[in-house]
């Protein structure tokens, strides 16, 4: 049996149909994908980082003077009532100053009462109800009695001197009367001797003697009258000196009265100021609320003047999310837009998306203190649906909790996302000179 070596011819195969089919499939896929990209709507969102905060303003607690901490009674998260003491500062120095001022005040009002009694020439001092320090009252009573006795003694001495001088004047007046009677008698005798002399019964010897004696008595009278005048001058001088002393005493009393009144007013102001400072050594809660942002935790630490110590979130205050919106999205972020909020503090194993709504967008931008990037501030409140979700999951929002916010800006196609960078680049290129 022989086998003929013949060439085996394979049947011819045309692959153009397969290629065409493949190209058709690829074309259909591109058409479908392109159609989807061109027409299928995709949700557009602005992603922002935020933090939970109270809708009403938090009360920032500061201290005017600052000071050293002696006790801390609260910690972050504690609920406090209005008037509760939060932090106690060292008060030894201010108490010492206040004690000194109070002592000075007691001395001043006791002195004021004494000066008032002296000014009005009262028999006793009437102290005010504020004058409670018995030592000060006792001292002023002693001064009042001593001063009054000194004045009375001076008046008595003055009166006695005047009486003595008047007695001298009376004695001199008596002497004058006696000498006047002597002169009158001598004048009568002289007339008689002159009559006898005219009759040449006597010589002029006796007449001359009488005239000389008369002249001597007249001289004595003049000296005596001069003494009386001097004594009257002394009396007037003593009286004037006494009146001057009384006037000076009243003037000095009135001057001290006015000065003491001013001192009392000054001390009252200082006492009020120091009491206010002492009260501020107890840092108290101005409202009912929750303590947050406590910056101090060590007894013995120092609070700087006017520096923030802590904040109090008002009790039952509505909590919102304050988010930092990119400046590139601000033209689309408006009030009323819905947002999805995710809180990283909750269970990360579950998808914790809470519905919210934009209620406020800032009119101007801010600058991030850390990154230096500008941003707009948006306030997002949790909707009723969101509150229901929180309630179901037993989640509780706390001021200061971080959050991620996706603000819904509407719908866009995938194609618009794809071509936007290129159109922006082309616009920039055409705008170049």
Image (spheres, rainbow, N blue to C red):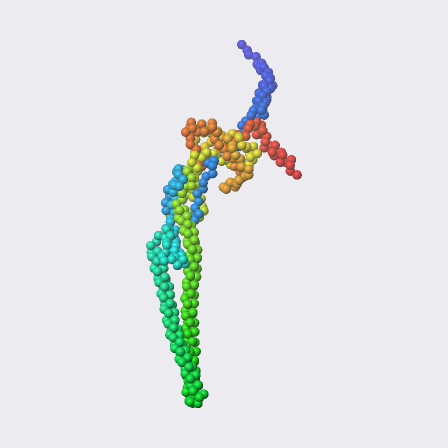
The outermost residue toward the front is 199
Q: Looking at the picture, does residue 376 appear above or below residue 303?
A: above
Percent position (x, y) of residue 171? 37, 74
Find residue 22 and report its horizontal and vertical position in percent: 58, 20
Q: In this view, does 287 lie above or below 222?
A: above
Camera-side residue of 384 and 104: 104
The quadrant in which residue 424 appears is top right
| Along the line of sight, the residue nearer the viewer: 207 or 325 | 207
- Residue 130, x across and y down, in percent: 37, 51
| Residue at x 42%, y 30% (from the top left corner) | 395
In the displayed orientation, state which residue is furthest to the right. 433
The quarter of the displayed image where residue 156 is located: bottom left
Residue 173 appearing in the image: yes
Q: Image point 47% across, 28% down: which residue?
A: 384
Q: Nearer the viewer, residue 355 or 329?
A: 355
Q: Can residue 220 be seen in this view?
A: no
- Seen in the picture, residue 87 relative to 213 is either above or below; the reply is above
């Amino acid at each position: 049996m022989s086998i003929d070596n013949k060439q085996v011819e394979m049947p011819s195969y045309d692959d153009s149909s397969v290629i065409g089919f493949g190209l058709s499939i690829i074309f259909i896929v591109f058409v479908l994908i392109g159609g989807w990209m061109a027409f299928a709507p995709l949700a557009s969102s602005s992603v922002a980082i935020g933090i939970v905060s109270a809708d009403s303003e938090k009360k920032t607690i500061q201290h005017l003077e600052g000071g050293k901490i002696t006790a801390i009674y609260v910690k972050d998260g504690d609920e406090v009532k209005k008037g509760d003491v939060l932090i106690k500062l060292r008060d030894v120095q201010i108490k010492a100053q206040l004690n000194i001022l109070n002592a000075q005040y007691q001395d001043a009002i006791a002195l004021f009462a004494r000066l008032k009694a002296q000014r009005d020439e009262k028999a006793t001092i009437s102290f005010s109800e504020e004058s409670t320090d018995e030592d000060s009252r006792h001292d002023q009573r002693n001064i009042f009695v001593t001063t009054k006795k000194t004045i009375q003694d001076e008046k008595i001495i003055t009166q006695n001197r005047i009486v003595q001088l008047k007695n001298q004047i009376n004695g001199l007046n008596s002497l004058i009367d006696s000498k006047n009677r002597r002169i009158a008698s001598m004048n009568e005798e002289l007339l008689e001797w002159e009559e006898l002399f005219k009759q040449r019964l006597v010589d002029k010897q006796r007449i001359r003697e009488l005239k000389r004696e008369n002249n001597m008595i007249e001289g004595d009278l003049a000296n005596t009258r001069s003494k009386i005048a001097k004594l009257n001058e002394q009396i007037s001088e003593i009286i004037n000196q006494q009146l001057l002393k009384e006037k000076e005493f009243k003037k000095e009393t009135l001057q001290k009265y006015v000065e003491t009144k001013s001192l009392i007013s000054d001390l009252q102001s200082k006492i009020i100021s120091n009491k206010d400072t002492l009260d501020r050594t107890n840092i108290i809660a101005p409202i009912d609320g929750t303590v947050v942002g406590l910056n101090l935790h060590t007894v013995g630490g120092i609070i700087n003047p006017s520096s923030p110590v802590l904040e109090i979130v008002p009790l039952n205050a509505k909590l919102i999310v304050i988010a930092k919106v990119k400046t590139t999205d601000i033209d689309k972020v408006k009030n009323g837009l819905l947002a999805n909020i995710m809180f990283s503090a909750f269970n990360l194993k579950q998808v914790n998306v809470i519905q919210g709504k934009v209620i406020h967008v800032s009119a101007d931008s801010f600058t991030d203190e850390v990154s230096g990037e500008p941003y707009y501030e948006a306030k997002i409140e949790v909707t009723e649906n969101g509150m229901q979700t929180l309630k179901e999951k037993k989640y509780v929002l706390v001021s200061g909790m971080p959050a991620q916010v996706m603000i819904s800006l509407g719908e866009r196609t995938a194609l618009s996302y794809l071509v936007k960078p290129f159109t922006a680049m082309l616009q920039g290129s055409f705008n170049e000179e």
